[in-house]
Image (cartoon, rainbow, N blue to C red):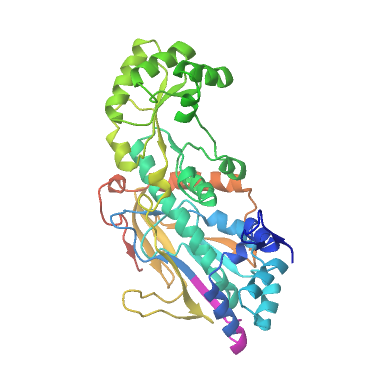
Amino acid sequence: MSTLGRRSGAVRIPFRIMEIASGHAPALFTDRYELTMVAAALADGTADRDCVFEVFARRLPHGRRYGVLAGTGRLLDELPSFRFGDDELATLREQGITDERLLDWLADFRFTGDIEGYAEGDLYFPGSPVLTVRAPFAEGVLLETLALSILNHDSAIASAAARMVAAACERPCIEMGSRRTHEEAAVAAARAAYLVGFASSSNLEAGRRYGVPTTGTSAHAFTLLHDDEKAAFRAQVDVLGPGTTLLVDTYDVDQGIRTAVEVAGPELGGIRLDSGDLPTLATHARELLDSLGATRTRIVVTSDLDEYAISGLMAAPVDRYGVGTSLVTGSGAPTMGMVYKLVERDGRPVAKKSEGKRSVGGRKNAVRRHDDGIAVAEVVSSRPIAERDGDRQLVVPLVQGGERCTQLTPAEALLEARAHHERVRAALPPEAWALSRGEPVLETVDS
């Protein structure tokens, strides 16, 4: 086996292992205990039992009034490549997994079951069955880690971003958290934010993979690179034209605005404020821009914004918000706590009875009940639900016999989810838009 080391004494890592680590092997994004269960089930003959697994959240993060389901499209995109080839199997052997029965089964694995669930972009509440997997036990359990890691992350971002969109009251929000998180998480976060209404992202890979519109200005480093602010602004305008957005608070904001208009003229596209007392600065900046004839120049504000800061800027003449850290980190986007539980085996309900972690057995049906177009309840039951006028079926087929039900590009699927989210949010009752802590706006009830 070849090895790679840059200098004498460096830790030498097997090249093939580095290749796997830098490539994309979704089957290895799996907790080892899934393989432990598969191995034991293969040995005792229970691996092929027909099973139903459900993904749901027992509760929402403290004070949240609804959750937004995101990541379903990413999960379904991964299914075709969720396979154990020679490299993946070699990695398992190197980690001490040597059960030949298990390794042979994994070598032939591909998912052949059915998946249904809420449409991506829909809202969910405690107990909502957002994803249902029906498959032989070994196939179904193997998807647990990947499903939860994607859905928990993306739904946390989408749920936080939806609150920011609501606080912005139709003023555009820009996702710009790439430098605050893992590189792949940054792409997923940009996708999730766009799904719920963000206008654009700074992340180029999100643009390539999913068609998310991208945007970007410049950092303070670019201004500091030049001998003076005017030279920096001139360089940017020469390349991007007067419609660009100039960062004006590296030194003195007033002088920065005057210089920006001097260089770009009154057709300057925008200025960005990234520090200080933003409401006061934005108000003063608007007055100064107007006095200089730049009446159509937009004001973009950044600097650790969250939904509360955005709401606090509502009275200020701000045109766009750039959001980063508070969206992609745990403080701003707390985990949604989704779990993946076995609820049915060979057609019979099964349930966990542990104190504080009980589950409800049986495959679930779910409808959202509406009164005059406004959502009033989430009805979830393992029994058939007698539909009423205004009910909307929530569970839709996603995968049948291992094959995806719809054949859309990742960008097309994201646009469809974005449009669906816009429709379902429009049906929320008024109290859903409050930023104060509260209980879930819809109660999950059994029919």
Q: Quadrant of the rendered structure where residue 259 is?
A: top left
Which residue is more in the foreground, 243 or 394? 243
Q: Is residue 285 left or right of residue 262?
A: left
Which residue is more in the foreground, 424 or 58? 58
Which residue is outermost to the front? 8
Quadrant for the N terminus in the image: bottom right
Q: Is residue 397 left or right of residue 100?
A: left
Q: Residue at x 34, y 42 (%)?
A: 306
Percent x, y of residue 428: 35, 48
Percent x, y of residue 46: 58, 85
Percent x, y of residue 311: 30, 37
Q: Residue at x 31, y 30 (%)?
A: 278
Q: Is residue 384 above or below residue 279?
A: below
Question: Which stretch did the figure color magenta?
Answer: 42-53
Q: Is residue 266 above or below residue 95?
A: above
Quadrant for the C terminus in the image: bottom left
Which residue is more in the foreground, 349 or 367? 349
Question: Looking at the image, can residue 69 be seen?
Answer: no
Q: Is residue 148 above or below residue 108?
A: above
Q: Residue at x 38, y 48 (%)?
A: 160
